[in-house]
Structure formats: structure tokens, C-alpha cells
Amino acid sequence: MPTGTRAAPRRHHRWLLLLPFVWQVALVPWANGVQARPFGLPFPMAWQMAGVVLSTLVIGVVLALDKRADAPRTDGA
Amino acid sequence: MRSGVEGVLCLAIVLATVLGALLYGQRRSRHRTMSEWAIGNRRLGTWIFWFLNAGEIYTTFAVLGIAGYAWAYGAPAYLALTSVSLASAVGYWLMPRIWAEGHRHGHLTQADFFAQRYGARWLAVVVALAGIAALVVYVQIQITALALTLRLTLGSTLGPVQSALLAAVGMLAFVYLAGLRSAAFAAGVKDVGMIVLVVGLSVTVSEKVGASSMLDVYRRVQELSPGIGALPGLRPEAGLTTTWLVTSALNVALGTWIFPHTFQLIYSARDESAIRRNAVWQPLYSLSYFFIILLGFAARLAGTRPDGGNPNAVLLQLVGDVYPSWTAGLLAGTVCLLALVPGSILLLVASSIFGRNVVQPLRGGLSDRQVLWVSRGAMIVFAGIAVWLSSTRNRSLVEIGLSAYAAIGMLAPGVFLGLVWPRANAAGVLSGIVAGYLSLLLPAADAWWARALPGWDRGLLAMAVNAAVVVAVGLLTPSRAPVPAGS
């Protein structure tokens, strides 16, 4: 989403931040109906916990990609 | 059952922490300016920032509220697991933008952001009052929890209103004596204390309630109460469906960073990378809800019967029933801090906004010192309103929390659109706020939503109405007027 005239580094990888929403929101109606009990836990709960781990990974990856995008052009403001 | 040990330990923990916090704050700073008091002079490093921010998550809402929700409803308590990571993903994108704007233009409060971005001082007054309203609802959570803990620990000679008043006085005393830096210390103590306690309780609770392991607690509770593990949980008539979870989680995620105190927390960070790194680790915090939900489920296995069936009291009741009194005392003391510290930070923020963005613009010519005193006076009024709110209706902490998010959601369109859409303007933001409040508070609107979109979080719907109005007004306004903030 270009918001200004400033030449910003490419940030397409930021769209990855939508993945937690897909996992933890969009797929809730499906996860809620699954009868399996991983480790004895209710599936919808295990699903949300896996989503938490996924979110941390995704945000970590985006941070790493952001750092790489920023690195060559530190000339700044 | 309630022995003296419990009360003494509880008081000792609270007093020792407050004293330590005061000494810490005193050593760190001799300056009593508005900026030091409110945002620690923009010099808080990663660690303090992280602790304060985590402290926002580890509140009574999280511990007493979610455990109670798990006990009363079951699966709807997963909301806590859903909302934190979504909020972090939003925050990763949003927080650095807020920080950069604040840094560039010297904002101290959220209303400063609105005043500068929309070029309208009057809008800042409206935003400040709306923000304060949401904060007062949030303080209500802490007062409700602190009052409950005091009542359960110190004996029921205290009436509900008296204990709520006592809770408010405690918070005010803490703020008057301290400031943000002292609060950071106390927040650290309570976080460590709470983690130790929650882990300690979780490890031992299965044995206390006749299960062989933590996972066995989950297994048994699903046999004892079929339906507890999936939405809509144990009370389908409450309407806590998948739609409810999805819409509530979205509303919480979008509203989390819009609270005025979160804005000030973001401003207090030293740089953008401290904020970004924080967003990476934040979701992992929410995995600890595994233990909180476990404790709620364990209370079902133990057949815990809190006074009046009040879900907020379940955890304290469970520990009081099956643990020795020193454990109950430790828990009560830590829970007091858990309510006291965020409650004081919230009151502090509400009053500094009131002084800076309501009093100063309306009554110019007051000195910095006079404004500080007026803000401190206003704090008493805010605490009073929170006490009054907590005494009017007996609600679960999670419900009160969702109301606070609904209230703060009224400012979200102005923040998000203000950052990404140059055509968003002051008239639009004001119309959006008015439309949002109407769709949130009008009984007729409530009935309409219930028919048209059953199970939807009202806060999210009101936010959508609000945003649609901001966009509509922006499109209808000739485009030459507004000046974008960013470029």
C-alpha cells in the first residue's frame, strides 16, 4: 500500500502478518468442529495454541526481512 | 478457612513492593514535570518497556477473568489465546508508525496525535474525553478485582462498596506517591510473582483435584462436562459462538494499541526496534493462558463454589479451598498488585490526558504546576466513577474488558485511517465517533444488531459503522483541505 511519495524499501513481506488472522480467526469455524484431542486437549484450544507459536514465528520472520530491507539504505529520513 | 496468615502475607507483599517501587522511583528521578510523570521522558529502554507492556497483559483480567470464564463457560476463554497474537501482528505494523509520529512532533498523549494529524485542537478535547471514558471502564476491571480480593482475604465484614472504595483509595495513594518509573518496578515484581505462582499452582493443582497430570485435568473435565472444549461452551444460551470469538478477537486486536495508555507506553520506548522486537515475543506470553485455563477447569473438577456463583472469585476460592493458607495469602497479595499497578497506571494516564488535552486548551494560562494539580484532582473523580460503575452491575471481568475495548474502538478509525489515508479529516472523525457511540449505546441499535447479526461483537460493529462514516465524510470533502501527517 503506497501511502506517500517517499521511496521506501519494498515491504511486500509485511502481508505475512495476515497469516495469524487466517489461522486464528478465519479457520476457527472449522477448528471448532474437529473432534480429535491432541495430548488430551480440546482441538480448538490446541489449534489456538499452535496459532500463537505460528504468530511468533511469522512476526519474527517479518522482523528479519524488515531488517534486511532496511540494511542497504540507512541514509534515513 | 480464612486464617490470619493469609491477610498478613497479602498485606506484607503489597507493602514491600510499594516501598521498593517508591525507593526505586526516587533514586531514578528527581524531576516532577508532566513529561517525566507521564512518559518517563521518552527514555525507557527495551527491558522496562517490555515489563510495562507485559504488565498490560498480566492483569486481573487475564488471571482472575480468564480462569473464571474457563470455569463458567469453557471454550469461550480461548479468546485470550486468540487475541494476543492478533494484537501483536497489528502492533508490529502500527506501533512504529505511532512512535515515529510522536517522536517527530513531540506528542505526549494520544490526543496530541489527533490534534496534530487533523489540525484541530477541539478534536483533541473530544478524543481525550473518549479515551478517558474507555480508561475508566478499564479501571473498573481492576477495582472490581481488587475489591473482591480484599473482601475474600480480609473478611466479609467489608461490604462491596466499601471494599471498592478501599481499592480506589489504594490506587490513588500509589499514584500520588509514585509515577511511571515506580510503577515499572512494581510491574516487574508482580509479573515475576504471578508467573511463579501460576506455574506453581498449575504443577500442583492436578494432584489436589484428583487428576494425575495437567493434561489429565483437561481430559477429565471434558468427560465431566461434555461440550466444555468447543464453542459455544457450557452455556449455549449465552451466545458465545464461533462468531462471537472471531468478532471479539478482532475487536480486541484492533483496539489494543488504541488505548491512550498504550500510546504513552509506545512514546516512552527509546526506539522503534525495541517496539518491533517486543511484538515478536508478545504472543508467546499468551501461551501461559494454558495454565490459567487449566486452573479454571481444575476448579470444575474440584467442584469449587464461589460465593454467589461469581466467576471472578473462582480462582481465589479454589486456592483458598484446597491449598494451605500461606499459598492463598501469596496469591491474594500478588493479585492485589496485579490490580493495583495497572489500575494506578491507568488513572495516571487518564489524569495526564485530562490536564494536557482538556484543561489546558479550555483554560489557557495555567502554569505547568497548576495543570499537574488539576490533573491529580481529576484522578479522584475518575476513580470515583469507576467505583460507581463497579457497584452498579455485577459482571464478569471478561465482559467488562470487552466493554472497555468497545469504548476505545471508537478512536480506532481515526488512528488507522489517519495514518494511511490522507483524506481522513477532523469532521469525519468526529462524525464517526458520534455514529459509533450511537450504534453502541442506543437500545434500538442494540435490538437491531441482535436481529441482523446475532453473536457479533457490538464493539466491532460500532467500529465498522464509525470507520464507514469517516471514509464517507472524507470522500465527500474537497480534497485540498487536509494535510497528511506522514510525508
Image: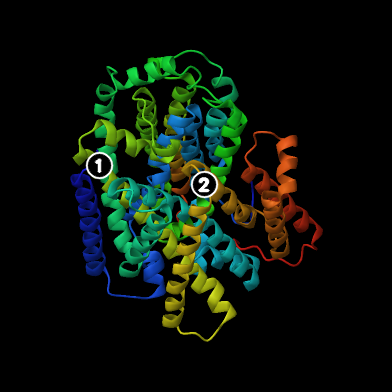
- Residue B79 vertical placement versus B429 (above, below): above
Counting from the top left corner in percent of width and height, residue B249 is at: 55, 38
Q: Counting residues from the N terminus, which is met first, the one under dot 2 or under dot 1?
A: 1
* Label 1: chain letter: B
Q: Is residue B179 visible?
A: no
Decide: is B280 above or below B38.
above
Q: In the rendering, which numbered label is found on residue B2?
A: 1
Q: Secondary structure at mark 1?
A: loop
Whether residue B279 appears in this view of the structure is: yes
Chain ID of residue with mark 2: B
- Nearer to me, B130 or B91: B130
User: Mark 2 highlights which residue?
Assistant: B400
Is B319 placed left or right of B65 in the picture? left
Q: Position of residue A76 (x, y in %)?
A: 48, 58
- Badge 1: residue crowd in 10 Å (few <14, some 14–19, many ≥20): some
Q: Can you tell which quarter of the image residue B357 is in?
A: bottom right
Compute the Cα span from label 2 to label 1.
28 Å
Which one is in front, B257 or B373?
A: B373
Image location (x, y in percent) of residue B451: 74, 35
Seen at 61% across and 37% down, the residue is B247
